[in-house]
Image (spheres, rainbow, N blue to C red):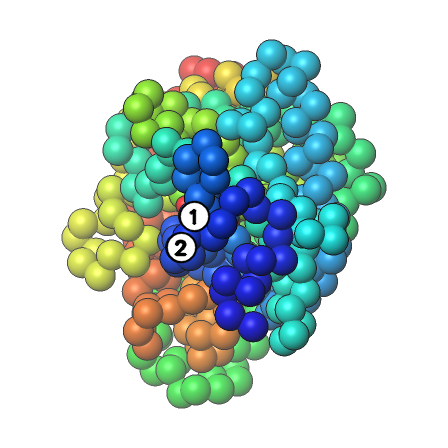
Amino acid sequence: MNLSQIAGQFSFKGDCLDIKPFGNGHINDTFAVECKTAEGVLRYILQRLNRRVFPNPKCLMDNMSAITEFLRDKIIAEGGDPDRECLCIVRTVDDKIYYVDDNADVWRATKFIENTQTYLVAEDGDMFADAGRAFGQMLSRLADFDASKLYDVIPNFHNTKARYDTLLKAAEADKVGRLKDARQEYDFAQAHSYLCPIIVDALSSSAIPLRVTHNDTKLNNVLIDATTKRAVCVIDLDTVMSGSLLYDFGDAIRVGCSTAEEDEKDLSKVGFNIENFDAFTRGYISGAGKSITKAEFELMPISAVIMTYECGMRFLTDYLDGDNYFKTAYPEHNLVRCRTQFKQARLMLERIEEMKNIVRKYS
Ligand code: ADP
Ligand code: GN1
Ligand code: MG
């Protein structure tokens, strides 16, 4: 089936004019669909879910549907604009929330949220602070969502200990003979393995609470209003599952405090912007409200290091495995990404005392 036949399976308004690839996600295949209607051109987002990453797309879509409906009601109750502040699933012509094509690929569609843009690097602290407010607000809106209704889409997604074990196995197997090119990075991962149990053990001992978390809070998963530069809508709800607030906080810092893109080859450009750390912390805490516990506050600074280190390990593992998980544009892409993450983690460790002071200031 071609793309316009797939688009024809959804209840889009008007006639489909154009379908083109859209966005910078590493996982799904995303397209913008333009439709001509009596009121003008309407756009939709059409996505083919990544089957390797999400082997159970039905459960993923049930999660997404439950989460978006729940958020929608909250936004309406708060007097917000649900069509702008929340993803809206567009159903198929058969009234289903996804479509399965002849290849068994799963497709979904959402309304395009117009006059927004995404960023790979935070342009300024105020914008990043507002992204923090949006992520924090989502956490607080989901505080009374029944987590037992959520399917664990990717078990152990942020289990840093498990991620480390997977890396060790990939290095041992050295399937495609790349370990020799990644010795320094592998050494870094091993030298910092003390980071692995910090969040995982705090969760399993109940020192910190299990919450409903987003789990993929990188900056381009929040749509920013093109005019006001305020965060409009948190997107990419594929990994909303039970987890720790520290996953969301730390992962957002990983991206938004970097002075360079995740795949910058020139490591001298990779810096840690501590002003952005201050801004995001302020925004996140204001959005999350009063529920953050003392133990969570204490772990917030190190969570940024852990999530950055974990992401670096995931890129390294995928490099050693032969690039099966993340989309890559060239053979060393995952290794390049791993290097920026490990540099960033090192820079954060150097500034950890300042980061602790910032969190203290807002807690
Ligand atoms: P991936 O899991 O591959 O990252 P995302 O769901 O994050 O996929 O979508 C990829 C990109 O598509 C986003 O970064 C954003 O730029 C764009 N996008 C997704 N949904 C919408 C939407 N409803 N309106 C506008 N842009 C969107
Ligand atoms: C992926 O889907 P996307 O591009 O927003 C990944 C995240 C990583 C991120 C690194 C489901 O996010 O966990 O942190 O790449 N998503 C999944 O850029 O694995
Ligand atoms: Mg995304």
Front-lying residue, 326 or 28? 28
Q: Residue 168: where, in percent of width, then height?
A: 53, 73
Front-lying residue, 41 or 205? 41
Q: Residue 323: where, in percent of width, then height?
A: 44, 74
Q: Is residue 334 above or below residue 299?
A: below
Q: Hey, what amino acid is under mark 2?
A: Asp
Res 280 → quadrant: top left
Q: Which residue is painted at 37% across and 62% down in the image?
A: 338
**Mark 1: secondary structure:** strand
What is the crowding at mark 1: few (fewer than 14 residues within 10 Å), some, or many (at least 20)? many
**Marking on residue 18:** 2
**Marking on residue 34:** 1
Q: Would you say 228 lies left or right of 48 here?
A: left
Q: Hey, what amino acid is under mark 1?
A: Glu
Q: Residue 111: where, in percent of width, then height?
A: 53, 40
Q: Which residue is painted at 56% across and 72% down in the image?
A: 1
**Mark 2: secondary structure:** strand
